[in-house]
Image: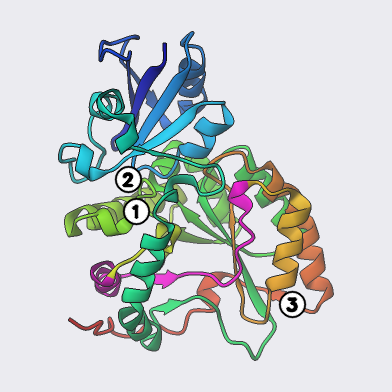
Amino acid sequence: MTLYAGVAWDATGWAVEVLDADGRRAAPARNFGVADTGVMIAFLRDLGAPTTAVVDSTNGMLDGHLAAAGLDVYRADPPVLPPRPVLGSVPAADLAGAAVRDLSLLTRLRRDHGTLTGRTEENAAGMRASAPQMEALTAAGRCLDSGPRDRPDVALTFDDGPNPPYTGRILDTLARYAVPATFFCIGLNATAYPDEVARTAEERHALGNHTWSHPFLPELTRAEFTAQVERTGEAMATAGGVAAPALFRPPYGSRSPDVARWFGEMDPSVVLWDVDPGDWAMPGADAIARTVLDQTRPGSVILMHDGGGDRFQTAEALPAIIEGLLGRGYRFVRADELVPATGRPADTGP
């Protein structure tokens, strides 16, 4: 019999409820810290029956880890769930219960699409609809997807960490080549691994805000968005011993006209990207390096990942990327060095 495990999150970590096909509790309810994610996955993997894990659209941190453990992973969206708190998902029992009631109303996550499975076009439509607001932000020096094309500066960026051991291995490689980079961190991970954040800051890499739990932003309320950004900034400032990050990257690049207006009302500048090797889907280290080398131009912002799953391939690809770009005459800079001086917040329109 298949079991259904709802995996919820709050400000401190994960809560897990496991139900059988009749909606009865099939295992004790458990709570895990983010640093114990591996323990949680072992708990789910060892339940003794095929297990389907259920997350919601505010949790973009776990699907890669869960899928790598051999679990089927589904996303439950707001229409089948009760209201959630400002900072947190719905309770784990509600996530599992949604699968028990009607699994066909949930979205099975694909390895090559992650938590964006089934909403790629929705995300693209949101980007198109918010183009006027993003153009206003760019004109005000508050947003970029690439830097100046007239000089050979490029920025390596890494999302979704910190995530031992991969963040540390990437930092080791950057130190060996004396190359700066920018790390867009998840708030929950920053609280779990403050030493990694502190090391990143001490080695003079830039730190960026990547929200608390990697949600799909168009589904958030204004209060939820604010909590995600502000709580992450506070956690990173505490862990890194620095000011709250001056850079922000939206998960998936997701936005809508409303979300784009919220970008203009917050303090950090928005950093997107123009080179994406899809390393999170694990196409192989050679493929990651080849895509970066093929797509990079002067001013490029290169998107890679140190968190969200097994990032061995990204770490393996990094030396070839650095050596290849240095050999072509590129200079590595932090993403904040590509952002124009910040002025007053842009008027992003109605």
Q: Is residue 62 above or below residue 182?
A: above
Colour setup of the view: rainbow
Residue at which label 1 appears: 216
Among numbered discs 1 and 3, the one appearing first in the sequence: 1
Q: In which image quadrant can residue 103 be found?
A: top left
The secondary element bearing badge 3 is classed as loop
Q: Is residue 171 left or right of residue 274?
A: right
Could you say where residue 88 lies in the image, as x and y percent from the top left? 25, 40
**Circle on res. 330:** 3
- The magenta region covers 257-281
The answer to which quarter of the image holds residue 131 is: bottom left
Query: Which residue lies at the image location 41% right of the left edge and 77% below the top edge?
Result: 143
How many residues crowd around disc 3 within 10 Å: few (fewer than 14), some, or many (20 or more)? many
The picture places residue 221, in percent across and down from the top left corner, at 19, 56
Give neighbour class at mark 2: few <14, some 14-19, many 20+ (Cα, 10 Å).
many
How packed mark 1 is, by other alpha carbons closer than 10 Å (few <14, some 14-19, many 20 or more), is many
Q: Is residue 303 visible?
A: yes
Q: Which disc number belongs to residue 58? A: 2
The picture places residue 274, in percent across and down from the top left corner, at 57, 72
